[in-house]
């Protein structure tokens, strides 16, 4: 199986007043062609930094301190700005989290959709037709008329459809979706998920889907990557990971999912403790301080324990947790 | 857009009405009597009384005000008794000069200010950014008549690049524009700095917006992202500030017109206020305020044209 995206030992550090904040530490993951891979993890685990690193759109104070990123076997971690610009929007595109702010408020939808086709030597009318066809495809009523509309005239769900239309229009190899449903209500969430599934089937792209919503990941994705405090702690097929997690963090995360609660509780379950200080991360296992399985051995860096490939977890006690 | 325009026009008219009425009241209640200035110290009380009656100066203020508006609405701005000509003639022969001056100043501040501001934001902390930053503050701080005087000294007297006084030959556009450059620059310079600062700040804010990241994530060329996607949003506050700033430019025009000996509303108001020439003061104030409100209205409409979010807001 070919891989659309391969990230290997990627590390990113932010320069802060308190010193280098190691937001990503040796992150490795892969997105096989035509599959939907979910990345799950709580806020601050490095999901957004990862996207920034993939697109080379990190803030100025961030530097990639190591690792490689390969898009369809092409190394892009060290690609020239010129080459990167060619890839963006064309080979990899992205749907951002908040549709209320991710579209330019003073430029019409049509103009924004035409502008991203700037590489194609086709006429204005053709670009318009293509944009309208794409809007129709994502379920926008009156797609031709909507071309002259401005983002503020559309609802959140409609705007996210526009964003998906823009991302899918150039038939990218990889579509990155950065929590595309977090800002939407639950009924819209399902529609957007269904839409992404259809789009994926039609253009055959791979999707990297970032979310902190376990239910959405389980519904949509083939594979899941679990991140904690800037590291990948577990990766595998969705059923494998969610039914028999091998990392204590994943296990806790699933236990804390409000969707699992059967009856009303006074307080929602949570993982005791807090995220480690990433300017000075502890040696050994990053989850050690909050982990119920932790033993003395956890002071050493956990190995990558393979269960049923591609399922693996970075934990000394993976077999025990896996059960 | 039509509803929005109508709303703004109605608001503009209301502003003119309130402002002029207030000014009229202040003017009439101010100490000082046109009869003393006009008829001289030796006029008999009878002549004065006669004149006051003729001009309606003894009526209660609200009657005078109503009379004033009645005349204005009938298209009569009154008569300049000092020179025996209709006020309208005096005002409307001066207006084009001031209009040209203020629009010249807007031209300088908008063109130079937006270019410098956008460029400074794009090349943050570069030499140009620092120099623009220091100069902007310096020119904002310097009063426009000082700038006017020094510009006159440097460019007209020492370097002899520009003419010193006057508004140019009537009918000769080239000469008119040539005479306009220096005074309009003297007024506009402070606003160049102001606009550059505003555009720079709002540009930096805009560049960190999510939709700019979207534009970059789709691989749009840097030039398009900055000078189209970002600048379109970043100039909005500058347009609004310039619209309101026309009031300041009008008062700066008073000095520039005196320094450069140009005809215009500014020098007309200055002369008539010092002579207690009520009809001319009121006539020119009416036109000046009307001009200001019109410009602010135009700025609003430009803003609405540039920012679709404004049009639907009521």
Image: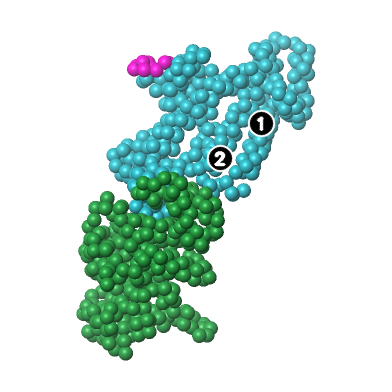
Chain colours: A green, B cyan
Residue A76 seen: yes
Quadrant of residue B188 within the rendered picture? top left
Q: Chain of mark 2?
A: B
Q: Residue at x 30, y 61 (%)?
A: A53
Q: Which label's residue is closer to the chain start, 1 or 2?
A: 1
- Using a 10 Å C-alpha cutoff, classify the residue at mark 1 as few (fewer than 14 neighbours), some (14 to 19) or many (20 or more): many
Which percent across, then down, holds residue B88? 65, 20
Are dots 1 and 2 in contact, CB under 8 Å?
no
Name the residue that disc number 2 marks.
B300
- Highlighted magenta segment, given as a residue range: B156-164
Residue A51, placed above or below residue B20: below
Judged from the image, the secondary structure of the residue bearing numbered disc 2 is helix
- In the picture, measured across the screen, residue A285 lies left or right of residue B226, that is left
Name the residue that disc number 1 marks.
B20
Dominant secondary structure, magenta: loop
Judged from the image, the secondary structure of the residue bearing numbered disc 1 is helix
């Amino acid at each position: 199986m070919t891989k659309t995206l391969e990230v290997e030992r990627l590390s990113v550090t932010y320069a802060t007043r308190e010193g280098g904040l190691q937001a990503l530490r040796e992150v490795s993951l892969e997105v096989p062609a035509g599959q939907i891979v979910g990345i799950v993890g709580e806020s601050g685990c490095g999901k957004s930094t990862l996207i920034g690193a993939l697109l080379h759109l990190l803030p100025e104070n961030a530097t990639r301190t190591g690792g490689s990123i390969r898009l369809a076997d092409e190394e892009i971690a060290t690609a020239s700005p010129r080459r990167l610009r060619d890839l963006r929007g064309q080979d990899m595109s992205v749907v951002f989290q908040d549709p209320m702010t991710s579209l330019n408020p003073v430029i019409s939808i049509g103009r924004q959709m035409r502008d991203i086709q700037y590489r194609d030597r086709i006429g204005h009318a053709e670009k318009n037709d293509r944009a309208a066809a794409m809007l129709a495809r994502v379920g926008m009523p009156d797609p031709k008329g909507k071309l002259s509309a401005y983002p503020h005239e559309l609802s959140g769900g409609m705007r996210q459809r526009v964003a998906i239309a823009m991302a899918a229009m150039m038939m990218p190899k990889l579509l990155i979706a950065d929590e595309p449903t977090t800002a939407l209500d639950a009924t819209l969430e399902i529609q957007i998920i269904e839409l992404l599934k259809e789009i994926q089937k039609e253009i055959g792209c791979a999707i990297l889907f970032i979310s902190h919503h376990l239910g959405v990941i389980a519904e949509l994705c083939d594979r899941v990557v679990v991140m904690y405090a800037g590291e990948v702690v577990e990766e595998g097929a969705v059923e494998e990971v969610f039914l028999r997690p091998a990392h204590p963090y994943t296990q806790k995360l699933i236990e804390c999912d409000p969707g699992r609660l059967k009856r009303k509780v006074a307080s929602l379950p949570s993982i005791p403790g807090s995220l480690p200080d990433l300017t000075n991360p502890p040696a050994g296992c990053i989850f050690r301080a909050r982990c119920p399985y932790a033993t003395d051995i956890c002071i050493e860096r956990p190995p990558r324990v393979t269960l049923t490939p591609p399922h693996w977890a970075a934990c000394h006690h993976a077999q025990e947790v896996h059960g | 857009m039509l509803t929005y325009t109508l709303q703004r026009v109605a608001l503009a008219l209301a502003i003119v009405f309130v402002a002029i009425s207030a000014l009229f009241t202040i003017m009439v209640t101010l100490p000082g009597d046109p009869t003393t200035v006009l008829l001289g110290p030796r006029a008999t009380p009878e002549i004065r009384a006669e004149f006051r009656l003729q001009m309606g100066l003894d009526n209660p203020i609200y009657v005078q005000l109503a009379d004033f508006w009645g005349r204005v609405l009938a298209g009569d701005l009154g008569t300049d008794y000092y020179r025996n000509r209709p006020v309208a003639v005096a005002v409307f022969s001066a207006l084009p000069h001031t209009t040209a001056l203020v629009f010249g100043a807007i031209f300088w501040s908008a063109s130079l200010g937006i270019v410098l501001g956008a460029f400074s934001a794009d090349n943050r902390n570069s030499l140009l950014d620092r120099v623009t930053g220091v100069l902007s503050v310096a020119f904002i701080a310097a009063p426009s008549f000082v700038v006017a005087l020094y510009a006159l000294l440097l460019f007209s007297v020492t370097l002899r690049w520009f003419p010193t006084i006057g508004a140019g030959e009537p009918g000769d556009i080239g000469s008119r524009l040539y005479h306009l450059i220096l005074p309009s620059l003297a007024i506009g310079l402070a606003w160049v700095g102001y606009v550059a600062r505003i555009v720079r700040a709002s540009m930096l804010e805009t560049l960190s917006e999510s939709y700019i990241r979207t534009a970059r994530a789709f691989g749009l060329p840097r030039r398009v992202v900055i000078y189209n996607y970002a600048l379109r949003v970043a100039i909005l506050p500058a347009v609004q500030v310039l619209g309101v700033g026309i009031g300041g430019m009008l008062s700066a025009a008073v000095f520039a017109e005196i320094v450069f000996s140009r005809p215009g509303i500014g020098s007309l108001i200055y002369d008539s206020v010092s002579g207690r020439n009520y009809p001319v003061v009121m006539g020119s104030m009416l036109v000046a305020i009307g001009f200001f409100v019109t410009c602010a209205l135009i700025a609003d409409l430009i803003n609405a044209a540039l920012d679709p979010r404004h049009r639907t807001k009521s």
